[in-house]
Each structure stands twice: as C-alpha cells, then as structure tokens.
Amino acid sequence: MDLYIAPVKLKLQSDERIRFKLLPSAGYLSPIIQPSSEYLCCFNVSEHTPSLEAYKPEFAGKSTDNLLMPYNWFIYTNNATIAIKIEYIIPNFADRVLAIITPSEKRIDIWIQTKSNETIVIDPLFQPLGSLLMVYLAHFSGGFLIHASGISHEDKNYIFTAVSGTGKSTMAKIWKESGATVCNDDRLWIHKTDGRWHMFNTPMVFYSQPPLAYPIDKIFLIRQSPVNEVSKVEGVKGSMRVMANCIQHLFNKEMSAQHLDKLIDFTSQVPVYDLGFKPDNEIVDLIRKLS
C-alpha cells in the first residue's frame, strides 16, 4: 500500500500481525502532485523495541491531560538518524512505539511494542506518530508545517496563521459560509512546487478530507480584535512572525538554517499581513478589497 502526502510517497510494509485500516489516511491513496520524495515505511510488532543507548535526547512532549493526550513522546538523534518514541499512559493497541527515520536511506522503521498476540489494526499515521513524522518528512522534502487554516475562494488562496485558540477554525468557518473551500483549519504543509509556494492539507484525526493543494496568494497573522483591521508586515519582521507559528522540532544549526532560508523565501514571495478580526462576515469583504 502507498500513501501520498503533499510531495512525499510512503511505501508501506508490515508484518503479518498488523492490518491497516485507513481512517485519517483514507483519502491519501493517490498523489495530488508528482512525488519528489519516496520513503519505505516498515511496521513491525515486537515485545521489545531497539535500544536508544547510542542516541541523544532532543525534545519531549509530556501529557497534561491523560484523556485527551494519553501518551508522552520523545525525539532522539544519532547523527542524522532520528528516533521518535511514544509511551502510552492509558492502555492502547501498544505499550510503546518507536520509529527510526534514516533520511540517507529514505527509510522509516516502526516497532510497535505489545505483549498481546492479537492482530493490531491501525491507520498508518496514527496519533501522534503521523503528526511527528510529517514534521521531518516536510523538512527533508523542502517544506515545513505550520499552524494555520487555509481557504480558496474565487481564484484567491489565503492562509490564516496563529497559535491555538486564536481563531483559525473560526476564520475557516466564516469563509466556508461565504462559499470558500477550506483546505484545512489547523495544520498545513507548505511546499514550493513549480516555483511557487503551495498549501497542502494533511490527514487529520477528527475529520476526513480529500487531498487539496492551492498556491498561496497572501498570509494573514490573525488575532482577535474588537474591530476588523489589516496592515502589511514588511521584511524580516513578517518572516519571524510566520516562523513563530511553524511546527518545528529542529535539533541542529544546519536544520534551523535550512528552515530559516525557506521561511525567508516564502515570505519574500507571498505578502504577509497583520489581521485583527471579530467573528463576522465583514472580514471577508475587507480581505477581498486588498489589492
């Protein structure tokens, strides 16, 4: 089975104890653009996962709500090799998951640790493994992930980026009610193709969508406001404000420099605006009037 996410093709292999049941990934069986990267993704079931003794810890995501986030995750590195470890707090299909990404070989090896002898039924991009893998797949294929909603309306395509709870989903809903197509309301994969930066939606846990891709005409840094107001943000200030909303688990100077170069190119080609808005349809008319 193959999955296609933005410019990446994942060739899936698994042992006989794993059965794939596509849920978030169900719409991603065909490419939306010609893939520029291909990874072999091998799933294994084991009573133990390989040792990380040779690896260096880099990041950790600790649960603050065991019901909403019943796991902790950790990122380790060994030179250019990346390890993602997930430990489940509440009993799940596994006790632990370990994924080893070897960029030089375009290979991802995934071990699912469990003492059960039952067949494991999973979506290949189960949470949080899929979300964490996409950060690095986007980076190594020349793009990045960003917290943003994206819409397409009357041949214009915009992204609205902000931290959680600021209004990305609200903005997407307002535009949808005005006839726009919502690319995604939370997380976008940004990738440059044919010389132009595009937004791609990604598999989501709570709803399904077919793959979508649109060239980006404008970037809006959104904030809640008692009035609707918009102003252009020039130069490096715009780049840094956009970068602040990116999903970035980068662990060395080289990766950080590459990421910064992408952001500067992105924001030099696509205008950036500061947008204060209140939740009504007037914001749609205000944005439409921008030249």
Image: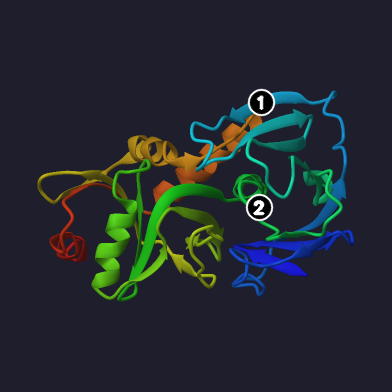
Picture quadrant where residue 6 is located: bottom right
Where 245 sits versus 53, above or below? below
Q: Residues within 10 Å of mark 2 (few under 14, many from 20)?
A: some
Q: In this rendering, which labeled residue sits more in front, label 1 or label 2?
A: 1
Q: Residues within 10 Å of mark 1 (few under 14, many from 20)?
A: some
Residue linked to disc 1: 58
Rendering coords of residue 63 (x, y %): 54, 32
Inter-mark Cα distance, 1 to 2:
21 Å
Q: Residue at x 13, y 51 (%)?
A: 228
Q: Which mark is residue 141?
A: 2
Quadrant location of the C terminus?
bottom left
Q: Nearer the viewer, residue 30 or 123?
A: 123
Picture quadrant where residue 243 is located: top left
Where 219 sits versus 98, above or below? below
Asked if one can make out residue 219 in the rendered structure from this viewpoint, the answer is no
Quadrant location of the N terminus?
bottom right
Q: Which mark is residue 150?
A: none
Q: Residue at x 82, y 28 (%)?
A: 52
